Amino acid sequence: MMLKNYRVQLPDRMPRLEQWIKQNRHALWVLLQRIRQGKRPPVFYAWPELPSRRAALYKMTRSLGWELTNLPRQKAIAGIRFKDATQQNLSASTWPIDLEAPTVLNTSCIDIRKQTLEKAHANAFGYGMSVDPLMHQGQMVIKSDENAKHDGHLVHGPIDPNDLRSNVVYQLNIDNRDESGRYFDYRIVWILGHIPVIYQKFKAPNERFTNATVETKLVADVALVLSETEREAIARLTHSMHVDYAELDALRDRHTGQLFVVDVNPTPWGPPAGLGRNEMDEAIQKMAECLQDQVLRLSK
């Protein structure tokens, strides 16, 4: 039986059978939580898109026993602007006026282009990644200005002015290899001013600019990989980009030791592939506890 008050909004393009399955699965889960908790579970509202089951936010809210929905309820414990887009034309004022939520995440996070990140990075860290492709001598990275394209590749500079492209960025070739020569990224989870989890993702040399990994590790202690100065710089960067919740991809140059945040993703899937089941469960628990602590703190 479909419970009307437990519905979520699904895309019209989704097949009817799939809609029916998802609606009933959601309704039954909320009903089960209501039985377990003795009351309707707290509501976490996502707008305009509903995070998929692969989203880290979905797994966090499920761990906490919160209903994650994109249809307004009378009251919500918190909300988030959630849309998988590099740029949005939506202003903070378009948030649904009939939604009551004491805390709303990423309300003004509407521009995560690489160019926007570069400006925020230079201001926050005191250095950036951008190079002038017409002047730069040697290898540099060229990649889309759009988020999550994973299309980076190396070119040799300086380039001919006729080869200059728009809608891309030209950046330093950061040597992010470890002592054994493996390329690795840090994926930093940022939740309302805190870093509950960092993943270390190792990649094959021919896939260093992709999202494919050969091994992933859960970093037990944030202080082991990020200095206090770097954590403060990340806080300035996220503040500048109006980011309350996101996962940041960062590289550390093996020669200079400098940290470079190369991507900001406010709609991440996760935890990443390559973790064992125990590590996945630990990561979800740490993220969920951080989200709960900060949401409750801000709602007081």
Image (cartoon, rainbow, N blue to C red):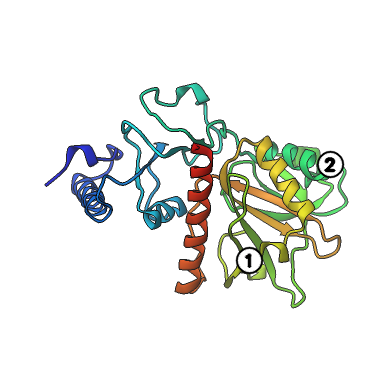
Q: Which residue is drawn at 40% across and 22% down?
A: 97
Percent across and percent down for residue 143 are 66, 48
The mark that comes first in sequence, 2 or 1, is 2
On screen, residue 160 versus residue 280, left or right, reads: right
Could you say which is closer to the camera, residue 127 or residue 58? Answer: 58
From the image, state whether disc 2 or disc 1 is nearer to you.
1
Marks 2/1 in contact by CB < 8 Å: the verdict is: no
Residue drawn at point x = 50 percent, y = 46 percent: 267
Q: Residues within 10 Å of mark 2 (few under 14, many from 20)?
A: few
Q: Is residue 221 left or right of residue 17?
A: right
Q: Position of residue 226 (x, y in %)?
A: 73, 59
Q: Element at badge 1?
A: strand
Do we see residue 258 in this rendering?
yes
> Is the residue 219 above or below the residue 87 in the image?
below
| Residue, disc 1 | 200
Q: Quadrant of residue 225?
A: bottom right
In front of the other: 66 or 14: 66
Compared to 286, does 96 lie above or below? above
Residue of label 2 = 134
Identity of the residue drawn at 76% across and 54% down: 228
| Residue 166 visible to an observer of this rendering | no
Dot 1, how many residues are within 10 Å of its Cα: few (below 14), some (14-19), or many (20+)? many
Spot the residue most to the bottom.
180
Give coordinates of residue 23: x percent, y percent: 23, 46
Asked where in the image residue 212 lies, by quadrant, the reply is bottom right
Q: Which amino acid does label 2 sit on?
A: Leu
